[in-house]
Image (spheres, helix red, strand yellow):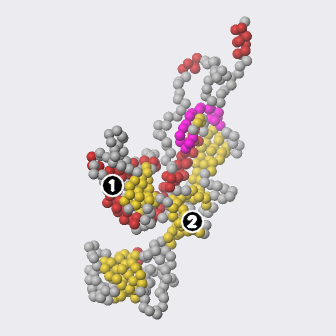
Amino acid sequence: MPGAIENANLLNFQLQPSAQQITTQTNYITNFDFLSTYLPDTYEKEFERYGNRTVSSFLRMVGAEMPSNSDMIKWAEQGRLHTKYTGVTAGSYGGNETVQTFTVPAAQIDPATQPQTGGAGGIAIRIGQTLMISDETAGSTLSNKAVVTGVDYAARTFTVAYYELDQADYAAASTFAVFVYGSEFRKGTPTMAETLISDDSIFDNSPIILKDTYSIAGSDMAQIGWIQVTGENGVDGYLWYLKSEHDTRLRFDDYLETAMVEAVPAAVGSGAAAAATPVGNKGTEGIFHVVGTRGNVWSGGNPTVLSDFDSIIERLDKQGSIEENVIFLNRNFGFDIDDMLATQNSYGSNGTSYGLFDNDEEMALNLGFRGFRRGYDFYKSDWKYLNDPTMRGGLVGGQINGLMVPAGSTTVYDQVLGKNAKRPFLHVRYRASETEDRRYKTWITGGAGGATTIGDDVMNVNFLSERCVCTLGANNFFLFKQ
C-alpha cells in the first residue's frame, strides 16, 4: 500500500540538528512524553535589566598603553623657571633704611624641588640680581625694588640695597613676597658668582599584578543550557557554561581601570605591606592618589557659580595653563554645571531657553551643556564609575564628584629610554618583553574542557595583568571632592 511504503521510508530518517535555530524535517522531534506538555515557556535571551554593567572606558578615552620591561617607571618633570618666595621676614621695619636684610622661611626651601645654587645649595637668589619686594599685609600697596648685595646661603638670608631713597614704611612684623626680575652690574666687573641647577622633579611608579580566575567542574560542563547575550564589550551570540566566564572577564576588564584610578602605595609598616604571601605587596600610585597628593583639590561641594570657576582658573594660571580641559563627573555635578550656565542666559531663571537659545515649541527643550569657555575651554563628560551604585555612586565618606584632566600630551624625559618623549598626561605602562607580554594574559588549566594540565576534574580560566598608571603634570589636574 502506498501508505505503508511511505511509513517505511520515514523509518529510515535520522535526526540531524541544524547549525541555526530553524525548523527542518530532520530536526523536528515527535517522541515527547506527557511531561513535555507542562514544560514552561522560556526566554532564551538574557534581559539586560542593568544595561551595560561595565564601568571602564575612562582611560581608553584620555590615555594610552605602552610596554615597559622594568619593575620601575621613572620620569622627570620640569620645575618652575622662576622662583618666588613668600612669607619672607625683614631684619627691621624702620622705614628709613637704604639697605636691608631678609630671611627666607625654612619651609620655602624644599631640596627636592628648589633650584639650588651651584656648590652651595639654599635659596635661589644671587648677588647682583634685582628684586621686587612686596608687602603681604592685607590692603597694603607698599613695595620696593632693590639689588642684592650679599647672600648667606646657610642662613637663608640676603641683603639688598634699595633703588628708592629708603625702605617703604612697612608695618612691624610684615611679611613679604620676593621674586627676581633681572640683574645689574658695573662696568668691568666679574661675572655672576653663583649658578642655578635646573629645578627638575623626579617621579616614579611601579606596576602591580592583578589576577582573577573562573572555575567550573567537568560535570557541569556536560549540562548545556544556551543563553543569548548581546552588547557588553562587543560580545554577541549564544553562550552556555562560559556565561560566568564572560562576566568574570568583564569584571577583570573593569578592575584593570579602577585599580589604576583608586590604587595607593603601601605605607612602610602598613598591614598591606606586611600581609602574608601571596596577597598585598607595595601598592601603586593611582590617579586619585597622585592628584590628591601633588595636584589641585577642590573640596566642600561642587563649584556652582562662575566665581567658583574663576578661582579654579586663577589656580590653572599658576600651573601649566593647558588650554583645553575635560571634567569627568558624576550626575549631580553635571547638573550643577548645566544650571550654572543656564543662569547666564537672561531668561535662564524660568528655564525658557538653554543651549544656543533657539528652542521653540516644536522641538525638545535642551537643558544640558557640553562645555563652556572662560579663559580656558572646559568640556564635561559623565563618568559612569562615579554614578554606578556598586562602585563610587552614592558614597558618603571619600566621595569624589569629578576629575578634571588636561587634554593633549606633554614632553617629559624618560629615564628608561634616555631621551625626551611625548606622552599623554595619563597613560598606562604594562610589563612586556620579547618573550612575555603581561598586558592582558589569559590561559586555561585543569583536566576538563580540553585542558590537560592537572588531574582535577575542573576547567580554570586564568586572568593576569601587570601594570601601573603614569600621571604626568599632576599640577594641571583638579580633583573635586564632596
Element at label 1: loop
The answer to whether any part of residue 34 appears in the image is yes
Dot 2: few (<14), some (14–19), or many (≥20) neighbours within 10 Å?
Answer: few
According to the picture, the residue beneath numbered tag 2 turns out to be 421
Label 1 amino acid?
Thr
Q: Position of residue 175 (x, y in %)?
A: 32, 77
What residue sits 65% from the left and 41% below the top?
Answer: 459
Element at label 2: strand
**Quadrant in which residue 90 is drawn:** bottom left
Q: Position of residue 207 (x, y in %)?
A: 57, 59
Checking the image for residue 304, the label placed there is: 1
The first of marks 1 and 2 along the sequence is 1
Vertical arrangement, residue 414 with respect to residue 362, above or below: below
The answer to whether any part of residue 151 appears in the image is no
As drawn, is 199 to the left or to the right of 130? Answer: right
What residue sits 32% from the left and 58% below the top?
Answer: 306
Label 2 amino acid?
Ala
Q: Position of residue 169 (x, y in %)?
A: 26, 83
* Residue found at the very far bottom of the displayed protein: 188
Checking the image for residue 401, the label placed there is: none
As drawn, is 144 to the left or to the right of 61? Answer: left
The residue range painted magenta reads 218-235
